[in-house]
Image (cartoon, rainbow, N blue to C red):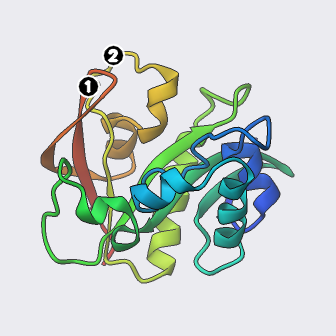
Amino acid sequence: MAIEVRPASEFSDVRTMVGPKRPDANVCWCLSYRIPSKLNRSLVGPERGEYVRELCAHEPAPGVLAYDGDEVVGWAAVAPRSETTFAKARKIPIVDDQPAWSVWCVRVRPGHRKKGISHHLVSGAVEFARAHDAPVIEAYPVDNKDEKVDLTMAYVGTRGLFEKAGFREVSPTDSVLAGFPRVLMRLDLS
């Protein structure tokens, strides 16, 4: 298996990874942390997908996609923190004034899990941020102490996943997900 990670500019592949089975469904589309909550609540049904279609048409792309050959198998959301809700999050601190980038959602398609694809996605997100001159990249994973994380809440990643990519914890947070505390982890890209 040769996994390739590319910018998420192909809307149909992004839709495969984060879109709903029914176009009128109000699923996340990985917008919850990307846009202000008022706008997030106002976008319903197909409007959510159209918003993401617009994101895919602009530079930088809204994240990265992992491919096994021609098949899309994974997604990671990555963007400047200043363009996300993490810029004003009350429960996740801002530790300095560097223009950090954030990676906050790592998803692998069913049937492709437990093959290391999430590691490729994190590496791809790091390279994507580096290619856009980010001095540092952050993640806000759960510190699950090797306990199993419910798949519906595993999208934020685990501390171990990011440690293996070279990230280090720089701050605890007041955020808890699926009963696990989240930590702020960083990787210096300079």
Please, what secondary structure does the residue beneath circle 1 have?
A: strand
**Residue shown at 36% from the left, 35% from the top:** 158
Badge 2 or badge 1: first in the primary sequence: 2
Q: Which residue is mark 2?
A: 147
Cβ–Cβ under 8 Å for marks 2 and 1: yes
The quadrant of the picture occupied by the N terminus is top right
Residue beneath the point at 65% across and 64% down: 51
Going by the numbered disc 2, the residue's amino acid type is Glu
Q: Quick one: 2 or 155, which is closer to the camera? A: 155
Q: Is residue 31 left or right of residue 173?
A: right
Q: Residues within 10 Å of mark 1 (few under 14, many from 20)?
A: some
Query: Which one is closest to the eye, mark 2 or mark 1?
Result: 1
Residue at image location 51% in from the left, 26% down from the top: 152
Measured as percent of width and height from the top left, residue 140 is found at 31, 47
On screen, residue 66 above or below 112: below
Residue 43 x/y as whole percent: 59, 55
Q: Is residue 123 visible?
A: no
Cα–Cα gap, marks 2 and 1: 9 Å
Mark 1, residue position: 180
Kind of residue at disc 1 = Phe
Quarter-of-image position of residue 102: bottom left
- Given residues 132 and 119, the one toward you in this image is 132
Q: Is residue 124 left or right of residue 44?
A: left
